[in-house]
Image: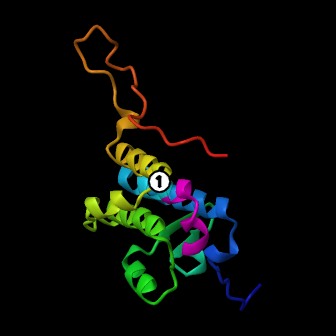
Amino acid sequence: MEGETLVIIDPIAADLDLDEVEVALLNAAVGDYAAEAAVLLLANDGYWPAHLPAAGMITVEAEPVGGQMWARIEWAELDAALADGRLPGSPEELAVLRVAVSLADGRPVDLADVVVALDRRRLGLVLAAFAHAAGSHDHCAPAGQGVDPDLRLGPLIAWPARH
């Protein structure tokens, strides 16, 4: 109608269910193996997908046509959220977050400090994240060894099946 202004309101991550947030984060990360690995690490760990949106650390945008959602974690704001208590976590949960931040945002992480904080399940997730970030899921067989060089080898360390 004449004189009306169309206002597009982006969804708020805290208003979405966890699956929608995960899909939106993956939509934005696709094609960047390190960013994909960071999102998959947090999603597979299971702790951070609920806590990051509640602390306002995820920004969601919807495409004007089609409505596909994209989301990003506000990596640069995490330190402040951790410092002011908006993102509490156990040593294991915080170690996973530090690895994800390093993968997605390039911040250095002391691997010696991280690995001693991880239980076996989370260590497997971090190893799967490293393998994913390295593109091992996309590697092909080496040429010249009697194997089809187009044969995909699969991930060096696979993500665990989710229940």
- Relative to 43, say whether 135 is above or below: above
- Relative to 50, say whether 133 is above or below: above
The residue sitting at the left extreme is: 144
- In this rendered view, identify the residue nearer to me: 69 or 81: 81
Q: Which residue is mark 1?
A: 122
The residue at the point 44 percent across, 69 percent down is 91
Q: Dot 1: within a 10 Å radius of its alpha carbon, few (fewer than 14), some, or many (20 or more) residues?
A: some
The residue at the point 50 percent across, 42 percent down is 159
Is there any visible trace of residue 122 in the rendered image? yes
Principal SS element in the magenta part?
helix
User: Mark 1: which secondary structure?
Assistant: helix
Is there any visible trace of residue 67 in the rendered image? no
The residue at the point 66 percent across, 59 percent down is 19
What residue type is disc 1 on? Answer: Arg
The x, y position of residue 122, in whole percent, is 47, 53
The residue at the point 71 percent across, 92 percent down is 3
Side of 63 where 137 appears, left or right: left
Side of 87 where 79 appears, left or right: left
The residue sitting at the right extreme is: 1
Count of all numbered marks drawn on residues in the image: 1
Give the quarter of the figure containing the N terminus.
bottom right
How has the structure been colored for display?
Answer: rainbow
Side of 111 where 3 appears, left or right: right
> Residue 66 lies in magenta, yes or no?
no
- Relative to 138, say whether 45 is above or below: below
> Residue 46 lies in magenta, yes or no?
yes
Residue segment shown in magenta: 42-52
The x, y position of residue 37, in whole percent, is 42, 52
The x, y position of residue 8, in whole percent, is 64, 79
